[in-house]
Amino acid sequence: MTQLLTVHDPRGYAPVVTGKRLAPRLDTLEGKLIHLVDCLFDNSEVFMQQLQAWFAEHMPNVRTEIVKPRESWVDDPVMRGKVVAEADAALFAVGL
């Protein structure tokens, strides 16, 4: 007896991805304010504190400030506005 089977492709459908240009590099970090954006992942706060300490030791003329969104995985317009208005650059990082 012959039976037909329906086979579904488990790969699904790839999302449409639109490429964007990277932000232009600064000529120097000297005298600049870098916002270290803690994305609220596990251990990211510890990592950001260590990164801030590294800057303080190795690049003392670079000012750093750790900033955080109100919650993870949700756009925070207030935090984003603060970064745009105050910082010369931002570094986003996640934890382990």
Image (cartoon, helix red, strand yellow):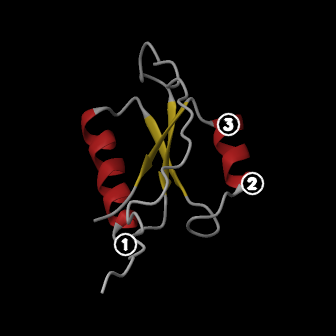
Instruction: Give amino acid for label 2.
Output: Val
Lower position in the chain sequence, tag 1 or tag 2: 1
Q: CA distance from mark 2 to mark 3?
A: 10 Å
In the rendered image, the vertical position of residue 77 relative to residue 1, given as above or below: above
The disc, 2 or 3, on the residue closer to the chain's N-terminal end is: 2
* Residue where numbered disc 1 is placed: 42
Q: Nearer the viewer, mark 3 or mark 1?
A: 1
Picture coordinates of residue 77, whole percent (x, y)? 74, 52
> Helix or strand or loop: what does disc 2 sit on?
helix
Residue ID for mark 2: 78
| Residue situated in front as seen by the camera: 63 or 90 | 90
Marks 3 and 1 in Cβ contact (< 8 Å) = no
Closer to the camera, 29 or 8? 8
Q: Quarter of the image for the N terminus: give it.
A: bottom left
Residue occupying the point 42% across, 68% down: 8
26 with respect to 1 (left or right): right
At mark 1, the secondary structure is: loop
Q: Secondary structure at mark 3?
A: helix
Dot 1: within a 10 Å radius of its alpha carbon, few (fewer than 14), some, or many (20 or more) residues? few
Where residue 43 appears, x then y in whole percent? 33, 69
Q: Position of residue 95 (x, y in %)?
A: 33, 63
Which residue ends up furthest to the top in the rendered image? Answer: 27
Residue ID at (32%, 81%):
2
- Residue 45 image position (x, y, % from top left): 40, 65
**Which image quarter holds the C terminus?**
bottom left
Amino acid type shown at disc 1: Asp
**Nearer to us in this view, 7 or 61:** 7
- Left or right relative to 66: residue 78: right
Can you identify the residue that label 3 sits on?
84
Q: CA distance from mark 3 to mark 1?
A: 25 Å
